[in-house]
Image (spheres, grey):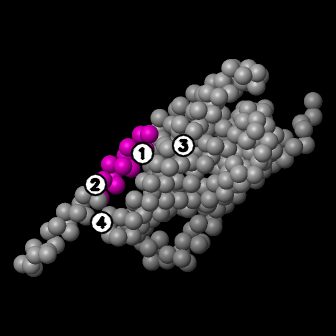
Amino acid sequence: MAMDPFNQLIVAISVTSFFTFQWLFHKVSPWMSTRISRPGFLGLSDKQKIEWNSRTVSTFHALLVGIFCLYILFFDDPVNEDPVWGDPTWVKTNVAITTGYLISDLLLIFYYWKAIGDKFFVVHHLAALYAYYYVLGEGMLPYFANFRLLAEFSTPCVNQRWFFEVLGYPKSSRPNMANGVAMAVVFFVVRIAVMPVYYVRMYAVYGTAAFYLVPWGGRVAWICSSICLDIMNVMWMHKIARGCYKVLRSARRSKARGPHENGKTD
């Protein structure tokens, strides 16, 4: 049976996305970085350059799909009114872009394992791809797929903090402290605070006629992948919060010691 023209388009978008992100990693990021931050980038080790390029690409992906997600969330009425079987046209397009990125990133993670290898990212990517298979193949659960992608808004802040540190900003510096706090707040808002909203909406459709039209594989992909991803989100939030607390505590101690170093008090 011939493939539906729209599904052919989705495959084409995924493949184009894959090669685009490979091109951004290997060509565009190094070229831009040497011009925007020439002394800093050229002074990095080979491993740091690989991670730099990886984070540059992930930042671009996050902003692209994140803005697309907001548009769908606020203006795609069919998806918001029917979260299980609403018209998935725009969601599938966005998920296709992310699918290409995830496959590209997995390939880079395995190839440059010593530099950017991380077992949790591998699990994260595979869990997401498993769920997206049903979104792209069956057009089901568009609202929930789109909602999960909103988490990408935390990526630019996380990456920016790493850029500051690798370029030599001390953790206690004002730019890095401000970025660290912003990163923690944004990460909490888009990955942790939204969990009740997500699972309340999931519970609202559980047991409905639309829910029972979802095959068992789709339900497993939906529920298990969501739980798996959120467990990792909580783990990462805990790590970020601890790091942020240590930086703020260190800054307070430095400030408290400062006035006494020259024999003066406040």
Q: Are marks 2 and 4 in contact (CB under 8 Å)?
A: no
Pick whichever of labels 3 and 4 is earlier in the sequence.
4
Residue name at image x 68 percent, y 27 percent: 205
Q: Name the residue under label 3.
A: 194
Amino acid under disc 1: Met
N-terminal of the pair, mark 4 or mark 1, is: 4
The furthest residue to the right: 2
The alpha-carbon separation of the residues under discs 4 and 1 comes to 20 Å
The segment highlighted magenta reads 234-247
The x, y position of residue 100, in whole percent, is 69, 48
- Report x, y in % for residue 214: 74, 24
Give the mark nearest the N terminus, 2 or 4: 4
Front residue of 188 and 165: 188
Please indicate whether residue 52 sits to the left or right of residue 265 in the image.
right
The residue closer to the viewer here, 173 or 116, is 173
Callout 2, which amino acid? Lys
Q: Are marks 2 and 1 in contact (CB under 8 Å)?
A: no
Residue 237's label in the rendered image is 1
Residue neighbourhood size for the residue with mark 1, other residues' Cα within 10 Å, grouped as few (<14), some (14–19), many (≥20): some
Name the residue that disc number 2 marks.
Answer: 246
Looking at the image, tell me whether mark 2 or mark 1 is earlier in sequence order: 1
Q: Which residue in the protein does label 4 denote?
A: 172
The question of residue 33 being in magenta is answered with: no
Q: Residue at x 44, y 73 (%)?
A: 40
Amino acid tagged 4: Ser
Q: Give me the residue at 42% from left, 45% from top.
A: 237
Dot 3 falls on a residue whose secondary structure is loop
Q: Residue furthest left?
A: 263
Q: In x, y percent, where is residue 72?
A: 72, 50
How much space separates mark 3 and mark 4, taking CA atoms? 30 Å
